Image: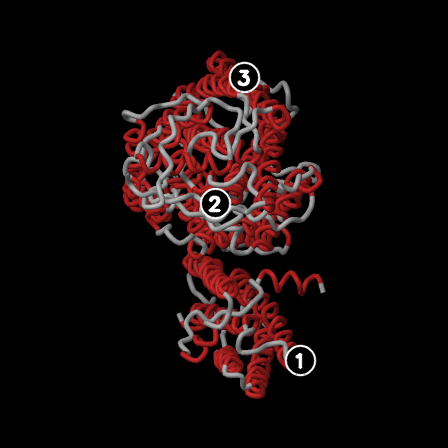
Amino acid sequence: MASISVPVGAHGGAQEAEQPKLRVSDYLKWSVDHKIIGVQYGVTALFFFIVGGTLAMLIRWELLTPNLDLVRTGAEYNTLFTTHGLVMIFLWIIPMMAAFGNYILPLQLGAKDMAFPWLNAFAFWLIPPAGILFIGSLFVGAPESGWTMYPPLSTLFTGDGQTLAALAAHILGVSSILGAINFIVTIMNMRPPGMGWWQMPLFCWAILATSIIVVMATPFLAGALTLLILDRIAGTSFFDASKGGDPQLWQNIFWFYSHPAVYIMVLPGMGILSEVLSVHSRKPVFGYKMIAMSSMAIGIVGFTVWAHHMFTSIAPELRIPFMITSMIIAVPTGIKIFSWLGTLWGGKIRFTSAMLFGLGFLSMFVIGGIGGVMLAMIPFDIHVHDTYFVVSHFHFVLFGGSVFAIYAGIYHWFPKITGRMLDERLGKWHFALTYIGFFFTFFPMNLVGMLGMPRRVAYYLPEFEGVNKLISFAAFVLGLSTFILIYNLIVSLRNGKIAGANPWRALTLEWATTSPPPPTNFISDPVPFTDPYGYGSEGSQAYLDEIDRRFGLGEDTTVPRPAPLPAPSAGD
Amino acid sequence: MLAELLFYRLTFGMDSGFYQNNMAQNALEQTLTRQEQLDLKNKRVGLIVFQISWIMAFICLVIVNLWLRGQQTAWPPVGVEVSLVIPTLMTVALVASSVFMRRGMRALKADKRDSFAANWRVGLLLGVVFAIGMGYEFVAAPGSGQYQNVYRLMVGFHHIHALAIGYYLIRVYQNGRAGHYTPTHFWPVEGGASLWDFVTVAWVLFYVVLYII
């Protein structure tokens, strides 16, 4: 029999049995525990998801008919989509990915906490005031320039709320940078003995690539926002063409951050997907190194594509190089897709809610990715520029990609975080309604976009009314589906089945401790299994059996336990 | 007090010397516990990552400068004379200041506390000279309009960093004089010196863009 590594060292005795009971109030206070901070990030982000989602519902309500009916003026409509975009990007997806990173990454590395726990808490506590600034901006001359804040819309033609929104984005940028520094140092320095770079879970690789992008790109956002704020309040004219400034300067700096920001939002999701697909199909990840390296490649190439957002405004001779780089970046993404398909192929697939959302990601993200390659083509891009085709594309990537991955991550790791299982039946309802609602919300936008319906306008031609009604009703279904998740989260927190330490029989280290983990994560130093995705081997079964023996089983029977192997003898 | 604590924390507790190659010091560091060594390593790597990150904000402003000058027919505008005397002297002062800070750090690690204090003091004085000189340059910025805007933006942006980090270095000096640092407890000193190096490198970058090219 092959020798196995045991998941943990010596038993912790009474110390292990003692699990401090956390109260809700513990999550409302300053804490340097990465697990509490992770939950704080997650709950805050979910709150803002509801805020941003409500704004989306209002947008779709307005677009039920070709004329103004919900809002009184076009300016009010501008406010809706501007705040929707800002909230969803800066206060939902990015913080939610940070939530997973904060909670899961130190556990996967077998660490007791992040490298800089205080800094971690500080990075989180920058978010609530920034959120308040965003919301407050609605009441002091709400921003109307779109989330891209292009001058002169953002400098000359919008109220004071624009300044608050820019300030809020500035603060969130600082928060992101501090968080990313923490992730990088934790990954570099705090891996346990036995976990080399190539034994590191793919979620950690994804967070590493994301963090590198954050630390390199976000200072550009800080620079751009500084100039914007100065133009608005200090009388400078960096973006005012009539005074020697240049609006295109903003576009270049902004997209130098904001295109990589797309990868900031989706790479952690890809990391989640690698975990979920492998665990729930009981297969080793196909092409582990390729997935890890493609994350890094996306991080690097992502810095060379920003001007494809400006095909209609940059010098024509610059378009071709950016078209080429924009197409090249599809290659590492394609590598991931094929690797995930290879992972699924021949696996013992369990259609858990996490797996369903993982598969949902695969299908929807591919559609978004293909839309991206289409938009990389200059003539096509010019044709559909600023139409609903673009809206469809980035929602397929950011909702079909990032949000589906977030949902998969929630169903996958909720048992670890709370010690309770989410209700699988509700999870499947949530998936079905989300998948259908999402598809019929965003896919028809491709059609109206190609027919010329412009984005960011409250009016549209009467012939688009039928499709827009379909889109709006599907959006309402999508919106309602979110409350199934919220209900499931709340009810399962109290009444969910006891999860046990490792309900999915997963090999990564976060499962080699109790659910939820103790304050120091592990009572003694955990020992990682040699291959974090080595499912199907005798060694992995022995390792997983040892976890079950060590920490006990939960009540959930979603994952059947194979007949345990005989315990290894002392000579093994 | 709160601001001080915040600054202390944000500078990772402070002190970096990733590139120092002192055998005796390395031997001393080996006497730290495993956890202390990890903490030190984390702080050093964290500060390096922060420096790599934040220099991008300065590079961003360099790009702003180059972009906006590309929109003008002449840069600096015709009739605007930019004197190199004060900026060059200030740059020399800043570079020298950085050298003294680093010498001070090495002295502390060799347990020569008087030498630490003397070097740090000179470094601080040169830093103050730089701050006053460039403060004057900010107020008396040459030209007008876009040129002056960009000039003040860059000098001012750098100055904010220099003042904040300079304040921290003064606190390190005071703590050092009070005997708070030892050859095995030196992170605030090492980190302070490294941050001041950052201020210097960022300024040299700006100096080249503002005055040379």
A341 displayed left or right of B77:
left
Q: Residues within 10 Å of mark 2 (few under 14, many from 20)?
A: many
Can I make out residue A251 in this image? no
Q: Position of residue B28 (x, y in %)?
A: 47, 76
Mark 2 — on which chain does it sit? A
Mark 1 — on which chain does it sit? B
**Residues tagged by mark 2 and mark 1 found on one chain of the structure:** no
Mark 3 — on which chain does it sit? A
Which residue was labeled with disc 1?
B178
Can I make out residue A538 in this image? yes
Which residue was labeled with disc 2?
A105
Q: Position of residue A82 (x, y in %)?
A: 57, 35
Looking at the image, residue A379 lies above or below residue B173: above
The three-letter amino acid code for the residue at tag 3 is Val
Which of the two residues, A46 or A286, is positioned nearer the viewer here?
A286
Residue A230 quadrant: bottom right
